[in-house]
Amino acid sequence: MSLNSILTRQKSAIIKKWFTLVIETYPSDTGNFLKTQKDPFANPVGRSISQGLEGVFDELLGDMDYKTIATFLDPIIRIRAVQSFSPARAIGFIFFLKNAIRENLHNKITQEQIADELLVFETKIDQLSLIAFNLYMQCREKIYELKANEMRNSTFKAFERAGLVSEAPDVEPALEPINITKEASNNY
């Protein structure tokens, strides 16, 4: 039996374990809430993580299309970027998938002789981490850009309230066409 077939059959258990490992990166109170609250309106973060992990796993089993994977990873990475996770903590959850797979397949790896296939699959997980890192950096850049704009705007408004800034008049300069050849000949 191929690794993909085994992973497909074990999908539910693997994703559940992966989700648990991701949730453990949060403080215990938050983790308990994310894990136990099933209402998507009360727990949109838990729902986003769960759906994202499942979508990523399906893509890893399939063609691994960059845009599709980015679509599933983006909400998870965005959440972790806003929560000021370090880059390592923000994308480290990707590697937890290796643990979840090995834990669920530990007997089958040696019995089925699928170790080589597992190495190839784990390489895909490594590639996934690079995609996640790119998304994380894009999110952090956007956050810094928003903070800089907010600071600039608040500083400008403070200067404006203090009377240190005035708007430029809306007077357009009078531009009259000049005949270059006529003026040039008069100067010689």
Image (cartoon, grey):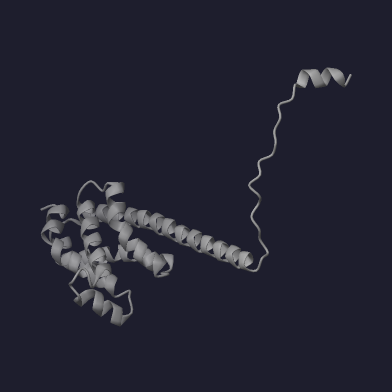
Q: Give residue 89's position: percent from left, percent from top.
A: 38, 68
Residue 91, quarter of the rendered image: bottom left
Q: Give residue 173's position: percent from left, percent from top.
A: 69, 39
Nearest the viewer among 158 and 178 is 178
Q: Residue at the spot x=25%, y=74% of the render?
A: 34
The image shows residue 139, relative to residue 28, as above or below, that is above
Relative placement, left or right, of 51 versus 147 is left
Nearest the viewer among 161 and 60 is 161
Q: Give residue 154's position: percent from left, percent from top.
A: 55, 66
Q: Give residue 55's position: percent from left, percent from top.
A: 22, 56
Q: Residue at the spot x=38%, y=56% of the render?
A: 135
Q: Residue at the spot x=28%, y=68% of the render?
A: 45
- The single residue placed furthest to the right in the displayed view is 188
Specify the quadrant that holds the C terminus. top right
Nearest the viewer among 144 and 165 is 165
Relative placement, left or right, of 115 versus 92 is left
